[in-house]
Image (cartoon, grey):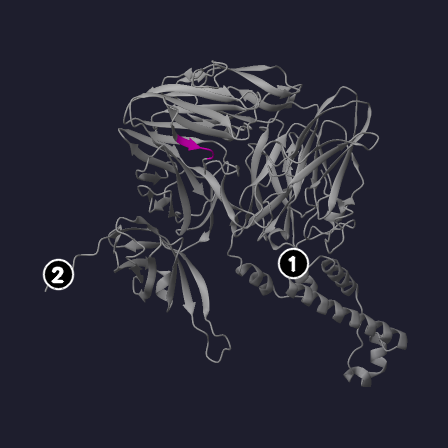
Amino acid sequence: MPAPAAFRRSAFRPAALLAVALGLLPGFAAGQTAGQRTTPNLGYVYPAGGQRGTTVTVYVGGERLNGASAAYLSVPGAQVRVIGHDRPLSVRESQDAREKLQELQQKRTSARAAEKSGKAKGPAAEEAAPAEKKAAPAPVWTDDDEKTVQRLRTLLAKRPVRLATPALAETVTLEVFLPRDARAGEQELRILTPAGLSNPMVFQVGDLPENVDQAITCSVTPPSLPASREANLPNPAKKSARQVTLPTVVNGQIMPGEVDRIRFTAKQGQRLTLAVYARALIPYLADAVPGWFQATLALYDPQGREVAYEDDYRFNPDPVLAYNIAADGDYTIEIKDSIFRGREDFVYRLAIGELPYLTGIFPLGSAPQAQTTFDLAGWNLPSEKLTIPSDKHAPGTFLLAVRNQGHLSNPVRFAIDQLPETIETTQPNDTREQAQAISLPAVINGRIERRGDQDLYAFDARAGDTVIAEVFARRLQSPLDSVLELTDANGQRLAFNDDNEDKGFGLITHHADSRLAVKIASEGRYFLRLADTQHRGGNDFAYRLRVGPPQPDFELRVVPSTINVRASANTPITVYALRRDGFDGEIALGLPDAPRGFFLSGNRIPPGQDKVCLTLTAPPALLDQPMNLRVVGQAKVNDRVLTHTAVPADDLMQAFFYRHLVIAKELKVCTVGRGSPSRILGNLPLRLNAGGEARIQVASAVARNVNDIRVEIIDPPEGITVKRTRVNRDGFEVVFACDAAKAKPGLQGNLVLNVFAERGPTKGSKQKQGQRSALGTAPAIPFEVVAAPAKRST
């Protein structure tokens, strides 16, 4: 698919073009890139998907993308080529360009005036009047001058970076080929620059034809949009409707105050699915409330009457409509932001057609190696049931989708659990007298089938038993907002819970699943009551209820999902432990499949802690290209040794405040240039006396060449600070202080240090502060706070 003409004209590199226009020396470009020590960051991809078997032109917006040389898509067989990089001018570049343009315009004026007055002389005239050779030659306007003026005008037509969103200011243009046999679904796109590999962005691969509106970037303002980007909210800007043929996926971007309109022809009796993907593409916006593009969807009939409207789908912010076409004709869709916001990263994909859509399945899971028949709910489905043959699945959550007439449905989640499975069989079971008896442990698959319904289960327990009861519904895409209550045989409430947060599901903002952990005081019969907190119900209000003794376990998340590190050097990463059912033991971390030379320092999560910051060290040799890495955690639980692979994730901010661990498909590592090795000398872990000091020596060749060293602790433990540093012949020494009031004996973890060289202000300089340059990150230093030795009596 060729790039729109308006964009092709601007698909040059402004820094290089400005350098040519201003006649800059090669050192200018070097100066531009020398300061780019931060990794590239992507803000949006447009279009955020493509059809299998096609080639797509894709625009990627972000920052620090200069020198983009390659892109990586998690689709085997896909081919991605970088065909352009564009960015607005900096304020300094705009000023330089204006000054050069003014200089050239003055030259042209003088040249034309000289030509008219006859002062512009050729070589023959100069020979006839040798006395005039000493006078300043009249300016001559050349074709090169005219070309430079045109280049500068083109550059100055671009908005300066201060008028754009800095995080979206640059654009990389890609050509993406998707093979016909590519796996459909959500994939990941990353871009490689000299500064490293970027964060991943969602890129959807599908079967439907794609309809793509002209790209809007921070570098190019379409003629239909004012440069000020101000919205006239009472009269939102409705663009002329795009005519599309069904089925299709419509791709667009919403700008401030804008409404996109899509027109299609439909026939009576068609049941259409209209599904928006907006928040699914960019889960969280750090600088917007509520923290994502909140799309709304309205459908108008041939007479212009609104016949359907949605602004979400259950608890998912992305709206979905199912509509039965009542009469032949042209229908119009309007899509916008709920409060008329907009920006280049308000990207959407809208699937339209007689497409299968799953609204729910039952049961929501099964046991490993068990053939399971699921009841299917939704529209345009191939059947009402789906049988999945037995397979060897480890416990966890998986995706299920169906095909109808060649079209793939949306995926829904189901769970695999090793506990015995049972189905809610007693109906009604709304009272203690009607409660369904269960034997522990068990996973019960049930439904809150109607408004006001509640399900009660009875079980026997002994004194001293610990019983865990946990609902899995919202985490499996059920609309149920559960509440759990445990009572004894006399009806006395022993425990109650509404919501329980699970940080492993970073896309959920309302953690509506309930969980109880109760130690039984006396032998007898006990009752669990499960209901919807809003008294809703229906066939889609399904759940899995796990009841039984604790199953101590853990999951791991490793952040970030893209690791950039210099060869021989260290970089910090964070591993989060999601502890289950009271497990609080130590977790050892390793790299079982990594090439020789990669290793972790500080590779343990101390007992009882939920995360650790550690360092990854790269080998001396540079990688040919980014590679996948696997971090594994191992822990002893009772008499078992559990091993789990850390799931890659990114720590994303929502609406200026909230943070979420959002899962990625791949953990990528990229080596970025060569670094200087460093290592910790002395015994580890470092023992810090509460209320005292401790020192550590860091061997570093690069540190020996500077006069003053400063270090900063990444995510410092409360009460532990750097007291002083000193450069010596081996590298540098760091002295830590431990505040006994804040850091208690038994505290363990890692001290990860960012190291800086500091130079004071030069003599006679007006600057009060010196300059700081980063030297890298030291290997993680494991530490433990111990009790201060008792004072000797005199």
Q: Which mark is residue 94?
A: none
The image quarter containing residue 713 is bottom left
Stretch of the chain drawn in magenta: 495-499
Q: Is residue 619 above or below residue 98?
A: above
Q: Is residue 180 above or below residue 372?
A: below
Image quadrant containing the N terminus: top right
Q: Write down the residue under mark 1.
A: 161
Q: Write down the residue under mark 2.
A: 792
Task: Judge left or right: residue 767 versus residue 293.
Answer: left
Q: CA distance from mark 1 to mark 2?
A: 66 Å
* Circle 1 SS class: helix
Q: Amino acid at mark 1?
A: Val
Q: Amino acid at mark 2?
A: Arg
- Name the residue at the left extreme: 794
Characterize the magenta stretch by its predominant secondary structure: strand
Task: Kindly identify the residue that appears in the image at 45 percent across and 63 percent down.
Answer: 773
Image quadrant containing the C terminus: bottom left
The image quarter containing residue 48 is top right
97 within the magenta span? no
